[in-house]
Image (spheres, helix red, strand yellow):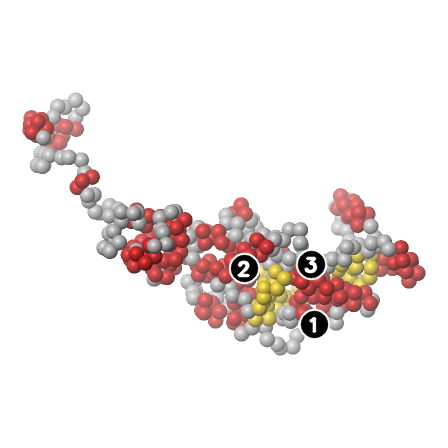
Amino acid sequence: MTASPVRVRFAPSPTGYLHVGGARTALFNWLYARRQGGTFVLRIEDTDLARSSDEMTQAILDGLSWLGLAWDEGPFLQSLGRAEHVAKARRLVAEGNAYPCWCDPATLDAKRKEAEGRGHAWKYDGTCARLDAAERARLEASGSPSCVRLRVPAGTTAYDDLIHGPVSFENADIEDLVLLRSDGSPTYNLSCVSDDVDMRITDVVRGDDHISNTPKQILLYRALGLEEPRFGHLPLILGDDKKRLSKRHGAVSVLEYRRMGYLPEVLFNFLALLGWSPGGDHEIMTRDEMVSLFSFDGVNPKSAVFDHDKLDWMNGQYLSRTPAEAIFDEVRDGLVAAGLWRAEMDGERRAWTIRLIELLKTRSRRVSDIARDATPFLTAESPTTTRPRASTSPRRRPPIASTPLRAPWPRSRRSRNRRSRPGCAPSARRRAFRRRS
């Protein structure tokens, strides 16, 4: 591939929230683009109209914004490019690299299930690819519904993965994939390649779960007479049980980590180290440091484990190093949620609260810990001008008004021992004190 400015894209589907795996994919693309002085493109792949929603699209944008992953172009909606997707499929048919298929989907599905029941893999046998011109003309004239399939050539499809190295697939194992469904709608692989071509994407970096799509998309590029981009596939993220990270392992979306009291810089730093090592003992890093050190050579092809304890530790390190004023907004959000902060307090108590945060942040692991520990100091009766005092410290004696009434003189060891024995009557001096009081 000829040298050209790096252009990468993050292309989530708005059928769910931005989760940890998607956020890390976006982050690695962002780091690579910044390291190479390239462009980071955001594309929303909303072609699954039945499951896509505006709410999920907004949640993805909010999650990326909270992490500070600013995109250079977009967001583009894939559904708006449908006409171009269809045009590319029709062009492939006209050039003989694709063909219409009239096979009944129900019949093909039955054949697939029968083969799987016998423990065999099944792929489309290319029946319609072998039709003669007369039979094809007859079927077209009949108006029977048809899809469009790519004609997969014999041979091997190979490429050099940015992370895994040389990878190859036997074309005999790849069926003639559907490009257009019988209702005329484009499939994922066609839409993806068409958009990547039009957006001049030079590097496609995504999760390992897409690796089976890569040979199909490379074949599409070659059928269109275009040079394919570089491909890289990131290892999966596993939970503590070494199974693929999912909802059962904790937060559903990236924004859930915000609610739980993690700083965006912390999650950014933590996700960057899930599968990537900058070398040496680097762990706590600024964004500029990560950009300067990032390379796909440092990405481990093996799956990474999401360690919640390490995330807590890293968040605590960031809190202790971050000026209190820089995390004031996050702490205030927690207090607002608890009903302990009103708008008028921004001017009235801000400086006092910042001093309080400075005292509490060094022993906190999450922003929510600071908000919780600050609660007793921020009730309506709390002072607003004096410096906060750690009155809950075990070294400080409680106020006199809260202590039980005691005799003003110390008792001897003997009297204390006598009182500790069950059934022992109070001393004469104690009884006299009670009568006087």
Answer with left or right where residue 356 lies relative to residue 26: left
Q: Residue at x 55, y 57 (%)?
A: 58
- In the rendered image, which residue does mark 3 sit on? 188
Could you say which disc has been placed on residue 46 in the image?
none
Answer with left or right where residue 353 lies relative to residue 59: left
Q: Amino acid at mark 3?
A: Tyr
Q: Closer to the camera, 17 or 329?
A: 329
- In the rendered image, which residue does mark 1 sit on? 227
Q: Residue at x 25, y 51 (%)?
A: 383
| Residue 410 vertical placement versus 327 (above, below) | above
Task: Provide the secondary structure element on which disc 3 rests.
Answer: helix
| Neighbourhood count class around disc 1 (C-alpha, 10 Å): few under 14, some 14–19, many 20 upward | some
Q: Amino acid at mark 1?
A: Glu
Q: Quadrant of residue 204?
A: bottom right
Horizontal and vertical percent position of residue 327: 37, 59
Sequence order check, earlier mark of 1 and 3: 3
Sequence order check, earlier mark of 2 and 3: 2
Estimate the spatial distance between the alpha carbons at disc 1 and disc 3, rounded to whole Å.
19 Å
Q: Amino acid at mark 2?
A: Leu
| Neighbourhood count class around disc 3 (C-alpha, 10 Å): few under 14, some 14–19, many 20 upward | some
As drawn, which residue projects farthest toward the front?
Answer: 344
Q: Closer to the camera, 206 or 324?
A: 324
- In the rendered image, which residue does mark 2 sit on? 61
Horizontal and vertical percent position of residue 219: 73, 65
As drawn, which residue projects farthest toward the top?
Answer: 423
Task: Provide the secondary structure element on which disc 1 rests.
Answer: loop
Answer yes or no: is residue 343 visible. Answer: yes
